[in-house]
Image (cartoon, helix red, strand yellow):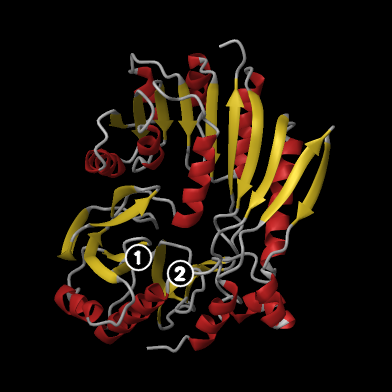
Amino acid sequence: MKKTGLLNTRKSFIRNMVNKDINCQNTNGIVKEKSAAIISENEKSSRDDEMYLNYADICKHDEFCGGCFYQKMSYEQQLNTKNGEVLKLLTDKEIKYEKYLGITGSPEIFGYRNKMEYTFGDMVKDGELTLGMHQKKKFMSIVTVDECQLVDEDFNIILQATLDFCKDKGYTFYNKKSHIGLLRHLILRKGVRTKELLVNIVTSSQSGFHSKEYVDVLLNLKLNNNIVGILNTINDRLADAVYCDKLNVLHGREYYMERIMDLDFKVSAFSFFQTNVKAAERLYAEAISWISDFEGKTVFDLYCGTGTISQVLAQKAKKVIGIELVEDAVASAKENAERNGLKNCEFIAGDVFEVMENLSVKPDLIVLDPPRVGVQPKALEKIVNYGVSRIVYISCNPKTFVENLYYLQYYGYKVEKVKAYDNFPFTKHCECVTSLYKQNC
């Protein structure tokens, strides 16, 4: 197994950075920025300045891997850049907000991802088997990322062990053009608070995969976390995406457990769950704190996933209705609510607009947490027609976020406050949260 001492050394002096906020207040239309110290005084006195400024260069995959975007920037620069991008989007779309609360950095900038979806392939045509991420600007090329800095070290170990096993067996990867081959993807998921690992190797239905031997290899690895499930998803679809035609449980169970905001959650193989648990917990807590008057009211949690926000709200609300397209996630949400002793949660699987069209109950307030494509026009129209006094919108894509805000603003909603969260250090992505209200409702 590969040694990762340099990576671990680098992590040890940067992982404990203090939380970072770049605060921007809108005063008479003028945005003023003020940034706090990015690391503690003790760290400043002991660190090597040059190494700190260039720590990202240590990632050996940076030249080819398309996973990260800001490898050449210090974390303070990353936050400033993302903060500026969010402000520009808001300005360009003429979003009139009463207060902009800046950007909050991730509690951890390394090893924060609890899920990775790797692809089997080769880096050069007819080259050796690889397993990892798509190469920059070369979609057909796959770069092995066995020392990725964004994941738990156990992910790197399992990736390398899986790649070695598949090479030894002489397996071929699924060719995107010929549609022939066995290996497609490797999906790893982790319960941060429970230290549970779920391994899912995705293959075509082509025969020849030695499942028992693969299980033995994984269970004999020296890991810091515990493997609770090893799965084999069969996918014969032509698209280069993970679909489940059949799920085989090779070992253990098909889910892992996680704990967030003092609630327990079962996360199944294909359920959506926040990628950075510690950062998401902080984001959710603040978003919910902006809803001060939901006690005894009916709340719609749209695009609810496994029901994290729904169940936190249900502790005070009269009733919470969560709507989610992915049936697997809804099944988990129902189990999670029962596990947490919540009787006032209802979860419905289906398209958000179509479900709302068939509901007789009307909400008092709405929480939105859509996928990257944002809220679709029909659903937005339905939301506006409800005329609720308050909406909290959580977005993982600032571009679609401002488009949706423009629509809501046009139909009479005021943007009270906006805050950005960098839950994905080194990548281009960040999240935004806003609170909207409508007067005279």
Residue 95 visible in the snapshot: no
Q: Position of residue 182 (x, y in %)?
A: 27, 70
The span from disc 1 to disc 2 (Cα, nearest Å) is 10 Å
Q: Nearer the viewer, mark 1 or mark 2?
A: 2
Classify residue 229 by image quadrant. Answer: bottom left
Residue carrying label 2:
151
**x and y percentages locating residue 295 in the rendered image:** 42, 24
| Helix, strand or loop status at disc 1 | strand
Check if mark 1's residue and mark 2's residue have beta carbons within 8 Å: yes
Who's the residue at 30% across and 49% down the image?
264
| Residue type of the residue flagged with mark 2 | Val
User: As rendered, which of 295 and 365 lies closer to the eye?
Assistant: 295
Q: Which mark is residue 209?
A: none
Give coordinates of residue 421: x percent, y percent. 59, 50
For badge 1, the amino acid type reads Leu
Q: Which residue extends farthest top?
A: 440
Q: Name the foreground residue: 141 vs 109.
A: 109
Choose top left, top right, bottom left or bottom right for residue 346. top left
Is label 2 in a helix, a strand or a loop?
Answer: loop
Task: Locate residue 337, reporting x and y percent.
Answer: 27, 39
Residue neighbourhood size for the residue with mark 1, other residues' Cα within 10 Å, grouped as few (<14), some (14–19), many (≥20): many
Residue position for label 1: 188
Out of 321 and 13, give the one closest to the viewer: 13
Describe residue 147's horizontal placement relative to residue 356 as left or right.
right
User: Where 417 falls versus 249 (above or below)?
Assistant: above
User: Which image quarter is the N terminus in?
Assistant: bottom left
Q: Residue at x 26, y 53 (%)?
A: 244
Is 54 displayed left or right of 141 in the figure? right
Disc 1 or 2, which lies upstream in sequence?
A: 2
Query: Would you call the spot at circle 2 few (<14 residues within 10 Å), some (14-19), or many (20 or more)?
Result: some
Q: Is residue 254 above or below residue 201?
A: above
